[in-house]
């Protein structure tokens, strides 16, 4: 089987966000994984207006250049780690919008989650699991949950507790297993 490719999607565009630091930490944790390449896909680099396609994404008839570029970015990946803040008991509007833009590009791929917030992003992940299910992604059980109180010094500098290293390894194992299995459906 060819090498798996996994996108770590930094799912916030808010000034002062933590998604970049969390994504970089995940990439560093994944650096020694064999048979898989992890990349960061930052929503800051893919400015998408609120969904502005006339046809539903499930039709695959993208009209706008920003949609076509986003589809071309996502399509090659076998799986995803969605990095999300928790805003108002849910994920960020930017990440929800980015997910809503596409359909086939998400199908039959694996998804894992890393979230942060005052309750470690748990509610954001629950919403993302429902969204990913509708997009026909298989979500893995293990997730990374970072508390603003214990994993961020003064609520700003990302300083994750050592216990997250083991959780990340389990998450990668699950994600890569599912991504590999689902890749056979798309071949």
Image: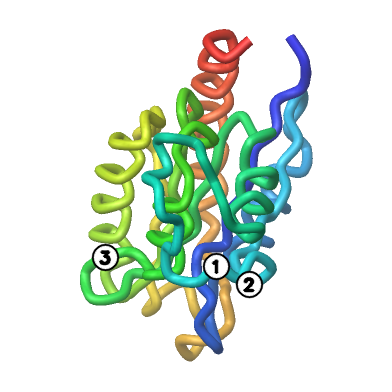
Q: 167 or 6, which lies in front?
A: 6
| Residue at the spot 43% in from the left edge and 70% down from the top edge | 50
Label 2 vs label 3, nearer the camera: 2
Number of numbered markers: 3
The x and y percentages for residue 186 are 57, 14
| Residue at the spot 54% in from the left edge and 19% down from the top edge | 177
Q: Is 94 located above or below residue 112 in the figure?
A: below
The x and y percentages for residue 163 are 48, 52
| Residue at the spot 43% in from the left edge and 48% down from the top edge | 113
Q: Is residue 54 left or right of residue 79?
A: left
Residue 48 numbered tag: 1
Element at badge 2? helix
Q: 135 or 50, which lies in front?
A: 50
Residue assigned mark 2: 44
Crowding at mark 3 (Cα within 10 Å: few <14, some 14-19, many 20+)? some
Residue assigned mark 3: 90
The x and y percentages for residue 6 are 65, 38
């Amino acid at each position: 089987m060819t090498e798996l490719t996994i996108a770590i999607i930094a799912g916030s565009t808010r000034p002062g966000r933590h998604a970049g630091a969390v994504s970089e930490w995940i990439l560093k944790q994944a650096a020694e994984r064999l048979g898989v390449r992890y990349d960061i896909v930052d929503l800051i680099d893919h400015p998408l207006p609120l969904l502005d396609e006339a046809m539903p994404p499930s039709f695959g008839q993208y009209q706008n250049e920003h949609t076509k570029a986003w589809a071309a970015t996502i399509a090659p990946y076998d799986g995803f780690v969605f990095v999300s803040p928790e805003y108002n008991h849910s994920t960020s509007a930017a990440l929800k919008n980015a997910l809503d833009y596409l359909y086939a590009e998400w199908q039959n791929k694996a998804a894992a989650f890393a979230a942060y917030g005052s309750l470690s992003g748990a509610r954001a992940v629950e919403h993302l699991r429902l969204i990913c299910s509708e997009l026909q992604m298989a979500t893995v059980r293990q997730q990374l949950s970072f508390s603003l109180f214990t994993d961020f010094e003064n609520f700003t500098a990302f300083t994750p507790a050592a216990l997250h290293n083991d959780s990340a390894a389990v998450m990668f194992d699950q994600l890569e297993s599912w991504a590999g299995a689902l890749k056979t459906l798309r071949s």
